[in-house]
Image: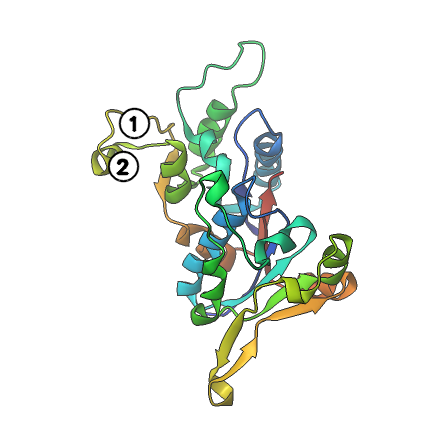
Amino acid sequence: MKLSVQINEGPYTHAASDTAYQFTKAALEKGHEIFRVFFYHDGVNNGTRFTTPPQDDRNLVNLWSELAAKHNLDLVVCVAAAQRRGIVDPDEAKRNGKDGDNIAPGFRISGLGQLIEAGIQSERLVVFGD
Amino acid sequence: MSETKRFLYVNRKAPYGTIYALESLEVVLIGAAFEQDVALAFVDDGVFQLTKGQDTTGIGVKNFSPTYKALGDYDVNKIYVEKESLEARGLTVDDLMPLKYEDEDDDWAEKDSIHVVSSQELSEIIDQSDIVLSF
């Protein structure tokens, strides 16, 4: 199946990102195609490279970056939600006059149209939230 | 993007207190550009998003309720509100903003966009939708 995934919560506070990660990984292992993983609302916070979680527990941001690299996944962070919450890539930093950027490897910032397109192009859009 | 798909946006949270209501509306407005078959559902505390007379001056946040009135102009005219959710909160359809649209197939006659439906009817609507986004 051709699937897309939507994640509506940030890392750690909710299990949404963990569950979405486990689901995405399992789907790929079963041979399904993941068209896009879209991060919305606080889900954009999964896209910062500045987290330092405790060493004896999973590093969610890194897990996503690594999965994306291994399977050439399209991890998209919504630009409107990212602007509200301070997730910035170099282009956004320049455009909005910020003195730095924090986007994690493998993630890209783009518009809500990418979510709609994912819904249209996929057989199923699976939403993980609160 | 060839075929038209049926999108259903399910709103379950009150308008202020969390951002889900506002950001859900943002998806609907941007999604309108894709000319798909769109419907909205309001359940549980989501029914409060449509109530009349919202005044946010006391809490210092933007009152975005007028935006729902523009939905008709974006060709979003199927707005389902769950009857059980209204009743549990002591509300009736008269407590909600009278959202309207102009039916281009009926000489632009003004019609109501809001349909109060039972939980059972709503589950059928969900079942018939291709893409269900839940906020």
| Secondary structure at numbered mark 1 | loop
Q: Can residue A1 be seen from the camera position used here?
A: no
Query: In terms of sequence position, does the residue under pointer 2 or pointer 1 come before the other?
Result: 2
Tell me the quarter of the picture where residue A17 sits.
top right
Q: Which residue is mark 2?
A: A92
* Near-viewer residue (A123 or B116): B116
Task: Report, in whole angstroms, how far the alpha carbon at label 2 lies from the one at label 1.
Answer: 8 Å
B99, above or below A96, in the image: below
A55, above or below B126, in the image: above
Tag 1: Cα neighbours inside 10 Å, few (<14), some, or many (≥20)? some
Q: In the image, residue B80 lies at what x, y percent? A: 64, 65
Of all chains, the one bearing label 1 is A
Q: Which residue is mark 1?
A: A101
Q: Does label 1 lie on the same chain as label 2? A: yes
Of all chains, the one bearing label 2 is A
A64, above or below B135, in the image: above
